[in-house]
Image: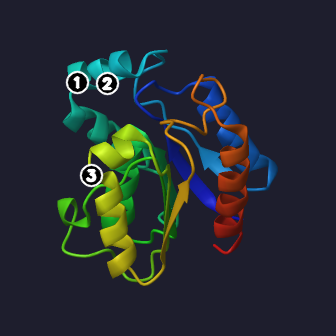
Amino acid sequence: MADVVLFHHALGLTSGVVAFAGELRRAGHTVHTPDLYDGRTFTVFEEGMANAGKIGFGEVLERGLRAVEGLPADLVYAGFSLGVVPAQKLAQTRAGARGALLFESCIPVSEFGPAWPAGVPVQVHAMDGDPIFVGDGDIDAARELVGEAADAELFLYPGDRHLFADNSLPSYDADATALLTRRVLAFLGAR
């Protein structure tokens, strides 16, 4: 079974993120869910992003990096939206990474190094009409990643919702989340 660190999105460690982690735990995986917002959660995306800006995006990233200190090196790093930033950086830079699961965001690989590390499989999941994923260029970064990494997959789901896998939000899509969860569990089962 895999040991996973799951970083929350801009709305914080919501009950939906906790529920998703619970699904992975029920399948036998160990899942760590660091709280990068010190207990604060939001219901409006813009308010969550404003909070991240107030904390400082660099500090949010540093909190993510500090969250894995003391954990074993052989982790799968996962993140939703804003949480992809620490997840992807750790997958690219921390020795021993077993994989990366990037939900609804993808950063250009060049932000954290010259190339995606050999031997680190990655999946990127998002809706094909998500205005943030598509509009902010994350889809281009994801396609570039899939084109260069030896073991990388991009899964696009029909729809235009951001944070579709968080069952505590109005943007939740049960069907897309069920498929995403099956794919993630298969990925983790191979680790």
Q: Is residue 167 left or right of residue 4?
A: right
Q: Position of residue 41 (x, y in %)?
A: 48, 17
Name which residue lies at 47% across and 47% down: 79
Q: Position of residue 83 (x, y in %)?
A: 41, 42
Q: Mark 2 vs mark 3: which is more N-terminal?
A: 2
Give the number of callouts.
3
Q: Is residue 52 visible?
A: yes
Residue position marked by numbered label 3 in the rendering: 137
Q: Is residue 137 left or right of residue 133?
A: left
**Above or below, 72 relative to 104:** below
Kind of residue indicated by mark 1: Gly
Name which residue lies at 33% across and 37% down: 63
Q: Position of residue 96 (x, y in %)?
A: 44, 72
Kind of residue indicated by mark 2: Met
Q: Quadrant of residue 185?
A: bottom right
The span from disc 1 to disc 3 (Cα, nearest Å) is 20 Å
Marks 2 & 1, CB-CB < 8 Å contact: yes
The span from disc 2 to disc 3 (Cα, nearest Å) is 18 Å
Residue position marked by numbered label 2 in the rendering: 49
The span from disc 2 to disc 1 (Cα, nearest Å) is 6 Å
Kind of residue indicated by mark 3: Gly
Which part of the image, by quadrant, shows the N terminus? bottom right
Pair 2/3: label in front: 3
Residue position marked by numbered label 1 in the rendering: 53
Pair 1/3: label in front: 3
Q: Residues within 10 Å of mark 3 (few under 14, many from 20)?
A: some
